[in-house]
Image (tube, rainbow, N blue to C red):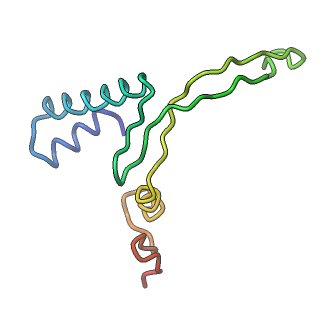
Amino acid sequence: MTKADLVDRVAATTGLTKRDVAAVIEALLEAIKDSLARHKHIEIREFGTFKVKRRKASMKYNPRDRSQKVVVPEKMVPVFKPSKFLKERVNWSDGGGRETAVDPQTTERQT
């Protein structure tokens, strides 16, 4: 799904114009990017958490010449950790929007 697909879907669901929805989605994404740039974490209940983690420096091999080692410097990387609810929802869906035989609320097989 692209940002344009997301705008279309939200506009259809809410009845707002695509222009208004696009502005809101862009503002949301900018707020997330700005917070991560300041090393702040963002928690969205029942969705997940965005945060920044430090990746330690490491030694890697040059892919063109495996005999050469390359130092990869320490850096900060954005990370997304899905919520338990989102994990269950993903596992309950077959990827096509249809539900599979296990209900995440009861974790029992449906017949």
Depicted 85 relative to depicted 24: above or below:
below
Depicted 81 relative to depicted 35: above or below:
below
Give the quarter of the figure containing the N terminus. Answer: top left
Picture mark count: 0
Residue 87 point in image, percent of width and height: 47, 57
Depicted 66 relative to depicted 99: above or below:
above
Seen from the viewer's position, the closer of residues 55 and 110 is 55
Depicted 73 relative to depicted 80: above or below:
above
Residue 13 left/right relative to 110: left
The residue sitting at 78% across, 20% down in the picture is: 63
Residue 55 point in image, percent of width and height: 63, 28
The residue sitting at 20% across, 30% down in the picture is: 22
Residue 69 point in image, percent of width and height: 84, 17
The residue sitting at 44% across, 65% down in the picture is: 92
Residue 56 left/right relative to 86: right
The residue sitting at 37% across, 50% down in the picture is: 47
Outermost residue to the bottom:
111
Residue 65 point in image, percent of width and height: 85, 15
* Residue 20: quarter of image: top left
Outermost residue to the right:
67
Seen from the viewer's position, the closer of residues 76 and 9 is 76
Residue 83 left/right relative to 69: left
* Residue 33: quarter of image: top left
Give the quarter of the figure containing the C terminus. Answer: bottom left
